[in-house]
Image (cartoon, rainbow, N blue to C red):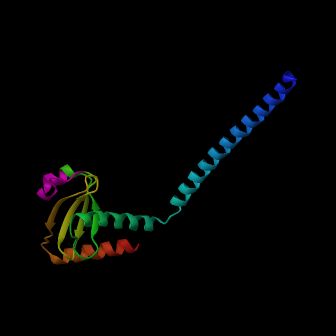
């Protein structure tokens, strides 16, 4: 009696283990498909929207550290901080990857470091020819529209 039920029990155990393995494999594939779908949806986002969101996040982070001037700044990446520091003392404590926020209307420039979450330096913009600032501003506005 005991020996005849043993093969049935083993068969049932094998079927249950097979179902468990299949369920685990199916769940894993489902998770992978969801991750790929999310990645594709992220890639499908408009690059202008992504850039605008990153810009707003950058300004919000800098705005938590100091009161920013009114208006929209021109945002530039600092790529060769050592050379800039040698050319102008304003960039002495800047590092590669910092952001230069230039407020043309307010005549101020700010170096913000996202990696260190600090305001590195704040300065006043001076131009020998005020029309240079206006020309730069209109060029940037045209570039932003495109």
Q: Residue at x 23, y 77 (%)?
A: 134
Please state the horizontal and vertical placement of residue 21, each as a whole percent of the image: 69, 38
Horizontally, is 9 left or right of 33 in the view?
right
Q: Residue at x 23, y 60 (%)?
A: 112
Q: Quadrant of residue 64?
A: bottom left
Q: Main secondary structure of the magenta part?
A: helix
Horizontally, is 91 left or right of 139 in the view?
left
Q: Quadrant of the N terminus?
A: top right
Q: Quadrant of residue 15?
A: top right
| The stretch drawn in magenta includes residue 16 | no
Q: Is residue 109 above or below residue 30?
A: below
Picture mark count: 0
Q: Residue at x 29, y 65 (%)?
A: 75
Q: Is residue 139 above or below residue 90?
A: below
Horizontally, is 21 left or right of 48 in the view?
right
Please state the horizontal and vertical placement of residue 84, each as a whole percent of the image: 18, 54
Return the residue nearer the eye: 21 or 42. 21
Please state the horizontal and vertical placement of residue 111, each as a whole percent of the image: 21, 60
Q: Quadrant of the C terminus?
A: bottom left
Please state the horizontal and vertical placement of residue 36, each as a whole percent of the image: 57, 52
Q: Is residue 10 above or below residue 74?
A: above
| The stretch drawn in magenta includes residue 93 | yes
Q: Residue furthest top?
A: 3
Q: Residue at x 26, y 76 (%)?
A: 71
Q: Quadrant of residue 131?
A: bottom left
Return the residue nearer the eye: 56 or 66. 66
Give the residues drawn in magenta, as a range: 83-95
């Amino acid at each position: 009696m005991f020996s005849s039920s043993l093969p049935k029990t083993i068969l049932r155990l094998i079927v249950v283990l097979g179902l468990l393995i299949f369920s685990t494999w199916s769940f894993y594939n489902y998770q992978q498909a969801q991750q790929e779908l999310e990645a594709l949806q992220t890639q499908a986002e408009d690059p202008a929207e992504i850039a605008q969101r990153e810009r707003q996040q950058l300004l919000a982070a800098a705005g938590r550290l100091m009161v920013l001037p009114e208006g929209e700044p021109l945002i530039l990446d600092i790529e060769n901080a050592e050379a800039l520091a040698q050319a102008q003392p304003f960039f002495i404590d800047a590092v590669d990857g910092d952001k230069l926020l230039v407020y043309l209307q307010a005549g101020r420039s700010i170096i913000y470091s996202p990696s260190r979450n600090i305001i590195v330096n704040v300065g006043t913009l001076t131009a020998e020819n005020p029309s240079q600032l206006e020309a730069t501003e209109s060029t940037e506005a045209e570039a932003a529209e495109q």
